[in-house]
């Protein structure tokens, strides 16, 4: 019965049943593609709901998460003043860190990251014009740096914006970006010296994912422990800073060896790579750690392991040589961002739980 039902669609005009392969209704001639699009949309929504429910179960909540990109990025398309920009960056000091009651627990709507991206992209185009149009090779070092920096640093600002606790200053973030990025690269190279380098086969790509995600995780764990991080949003920001720094240094290295074309591909591919993967690791580590001191048991917690395996697999499939490489990268970017949105939801849920706990303590 179910098999037969899948072969038929109803005409949106007259309701007549038509074979799913038909482009027009056999009764009234109306186009059937709208019904087919609706069916595809329904299937896509079902897949997304199942995916968010599964990932959200790793955070301790057995429900799907609604992802409304239009509402989330609403502020990107609005005009903002310089004062609004300053207020975002003035955060993380004793005077500017809000109390728990002042922390927003509603949907975040970042926008400043888009301005940073446009500014850095504009500088990149200027340097590219100097090099290609005016044949001035002095622009080449700056081009390498800006090309490596544009996307990862813009993503870092994104994660800085969505940190609703506003308890980490931009100075601290940039410090972790450079120091954490450099040390995570050093840690990765050290682990490679013990394991050997991977290649782009299945097993080789998995080795790359394991080594590089573990190398970055070690540095994330250091900063989480040192700064006594207890909030999911903070862990996500720490991870993003380290991942973005790693991405910048790695992109610059690839550009030096393989040229501007590879630099531009890797730079814009950074939208769904190291910054996102390490943000997932940072958020997941704090998710299982919460207020307790960091212990080895946290790294073997099944909820953390799920996110760790996800980051490793995303990295492995990213590097693996497969057919339809462009479609593969798009799919991996989408999966990575779905995980990020689920963790954002978990972060907002954490704020609500903390506020509720504080209110109950006051009542008692």
Image (cartoon, rainbow, N blue to C red):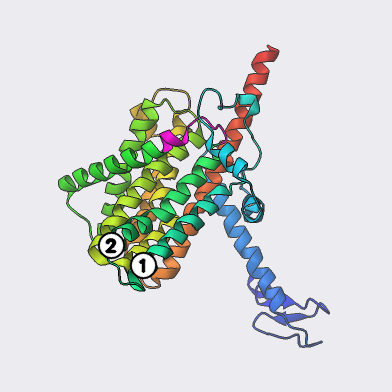
- Total numbered labels: 2
The answer to whether residue 18 is above or below residue 2 is below
Q: Residues within 10 Å of mark 2 (few under 14, many from 20)?
A: few
Q: Residue 232's spot in the image, x, y percent?
A: 50, 35
* Cβ atoms under marks 1 and 2 closer than 8 Å: yes
Instruction: Return the residue found at the far right.
Output: 14
- Secondary structure character of the magenta stretch overall: loop
Quadrant of the rendered structure where residue 37 is?
bottom right
Residue that appears at 63% across and 31% down: 352
Disc 1 or 2, which lies upstream in sequence? 1
Which residue is at the front of the view, 23 or 294? 294
Q: Residues within 10 Å of mark 1 (few under 14, many from 20)?
A: some
Quadrant of the rendered structure where residue 43 is?
bottom right
Q: Residue 268's spot in the image, x, y percent?
A: 42, 61
The answer to whether residue 104 is above or below residue 244 is above
**Residue range corresponding to the magenta coloring:** 164-173
> Label 1: which residue?
130
Q: Residue 178's spot in the image, x, y percent?
A: 34, 41
Residue 48 visible somewhere in the drawing = yes
> Label 2: which residue?
138
Which residue is at the front of the view, 138 or 40? 138
CA distance for labels 1 and 2: 9 Å
Q: Which mark is residue 239?
A: none
């Amino acid at each position: 019965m179910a098999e037969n039902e899948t072969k038929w669609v109803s005409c949106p005009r007259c309701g007549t049943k038509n074979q799913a392969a038909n482009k027009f209704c056999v009764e009234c001639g109306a186009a059937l593609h709208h019904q087919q699009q609706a069916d595809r949309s329904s299937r896509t929504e079902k897949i997304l709901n199942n995916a968010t429910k599964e990932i959200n179960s790793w955070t301790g909540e057995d429900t799907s998460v609604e992802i409304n990109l239009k509402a989330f990025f609403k502020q990107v398309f609005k005009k903002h003043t310089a004062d609004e920009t300053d207020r975002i960056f003035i955060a993380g000091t004793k005077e500017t860190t809000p109390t728990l009651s002042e922390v927003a627990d509603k949907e975040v709507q970042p926008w400043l990251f888009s301005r940073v991206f446009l500014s850095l992209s504009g500088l990149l185009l200027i340097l590219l014009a100097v090099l290609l149009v005016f044949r001035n090779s002095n622009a080449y070092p700056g081009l390498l740096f800006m090309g490596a920096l544009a996307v990862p640093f813009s993503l870092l600002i994104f994660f800085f914006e969505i940190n609703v606790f506003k308890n980490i200053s931009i100075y601290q973030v940039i410090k972790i970006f450079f120091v954490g990025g450099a040390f995570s690269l050093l840690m990765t190279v050290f682990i490679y010296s013990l394991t050997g380098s991977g290649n782009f086969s299945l097993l080789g790509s998995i080795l790359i994912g394991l080594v590089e995600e573990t190398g970055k995780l070690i540095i994330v764990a250091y900063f989480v422990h040192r700064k006594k991080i207890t909030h999911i949003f903070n862990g996500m920001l720490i991870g993003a800073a380290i991942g973005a720094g790693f991405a910048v240094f790695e992109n610059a290295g690839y550009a030096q060896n393989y040229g501007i074309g590879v630099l531009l591909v890797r730079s814009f591919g950074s939208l769904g790579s190291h910054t996102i993967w390490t943000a997932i690791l940072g958020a997941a580590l704090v998710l299982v750690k919460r207020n307790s001191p960091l212990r080895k048991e946290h790294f073997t917690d099944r909820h953390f392991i799920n996110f760790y395996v996800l980051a490793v697999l995303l990295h492995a499939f990213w590097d693996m040589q497969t057919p339809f490489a462009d479609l593969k990268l798009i799919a991996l970017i989408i999966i990575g961002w779905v995980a990020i949105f689920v963790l954002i939801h978990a972060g907002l849920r954490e704020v609500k739980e903390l506020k509720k706990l504080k209110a109950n303590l006051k009542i008692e």
